Amino acid sequence: MVHNLSKDHSLVSNWVAELRNVDVQQDRMRFRRNLERIAEVIGYEISKQLETVDTEITTPMGTATCKMLKEQPVLATILRAGLAMHNGLLSYYDRADNAFLSAYRKHHADGSFDIQVEYMSCPEIDGRVVIISDPMLATGASLVKCIRYLKDEGNIKELHIVCAIACTVGIEFVKREEPKAIIWCGDIDDELTAKGYIVPGLGDAGDLAYGAKMQS
């Protein structure tokens, strides 16, 4: 299942427009905040699908029966670009456990690239809901590889993928490799360059959020 939050106009489509805008992109703090806000809205939408339990809460005037999450999810993100969206999710799931993975494209002389995962830190993951965030779902290769690393640690009960912009090519790849995953995105683009960049997209989310990096 794929949810495109820009399909129907809301504030999310305004924030996506600002993420894409080359003039607004000069403000790194605003760029990060827009990623956070998109993740916050998606986090709220995901919460509607999570299991709840009726809980008795003592108030100053008596007792109220309230619905509360049955369990907290595990929030996972791909360093470094995913940090802003991770913070947005964490502001809503403030008691969640967290997982972090480091993945990057290792380019070769012929123009091809491999996905390298060099670091992972995660809590107990078996039988739990996992929400993984990464601003751009382009080819889907790095995301799927990170998900497989997480699944090596235990059986994921339910998987949600959160991104700002996704490409149809990447969505189809993820659906083939992880058919039970639920994808949530701020918007969807149809074109992908030979080097794996989304068009019109927004550029390099990591660089725009945290500054240009050295390439080796």
Image (cartoon, rainbow, N blue to C red):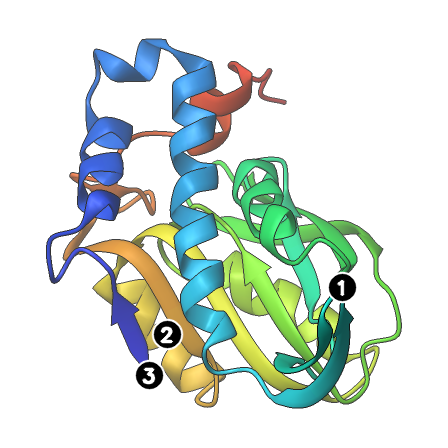
CB atoms at circles 3 and 1 under 8 Å apart? no
Type of residue at label 1?
Pro
Compute the Cα span from label 3 to label 1. Answer: 43 Å
Please identify the quarter of the rendering in which residue 70 is found: bottom right
Type of residue at label 3?
Met
Compute the Cα span from label 2 to label 1. Answer: 53 Å
- Please rate how many residues cluster around mark 1, counting C-alpha atoms within 10 Å: few if below 14, some from 14 to 19, many from 20: few
- Check residue 60 in the rendering and tell me which mark sits there, or answer none: 1
Q: Secondary structure at mark 2?
A: helix
Q: Position of residue 46 (x, y in %)?
A: 47, 71
Q: Position of residue 130 (x, y in %)?
A: 65, 73
| Horizontal side of residue 91 vs 57, given as left or right | left
Residue named by callout 2:
173
Seen at 37% across and 74% down, the residue is: 173
Residue 64 versus residue 190: which sits nearer the camera?
A: 64
Can you tell which of label 3 and label 1 is closer to the viewer? 1
Q: Is residue 65 above or below residue 32?
A: below
- Please rate how many residues cluster around mark 2, counting C-alpha atoms within 10 Å: few if below 14, some from 14 to 19, many from 20: some
Residue 179 versus residue 128: which sits nearer the camera?
A: 128
| Horizontal side of residue 194 vs 161, given as left or right | left
- Please rate how many residues cluster around mark 3, counting C-alpha atoms within 10 Å: few if below 14, some from 14 to 19, many from 20: few
CB atoms at circles 2 and 3 under 8 Å apart? no
Q: Secondary structure at mark 1?
A: loop
Seen at 18% across and 34% down, the residue is: 17
Residue named by callout 3:
1
Residue 14 versus residue 199: which sits nearer the camera?
A: 14
Q: Point out the tag, 2 or 3, that comes first from the N-terminus.
A: 3
| Horizontal side of residue 180 vs 152, given as left or right | left
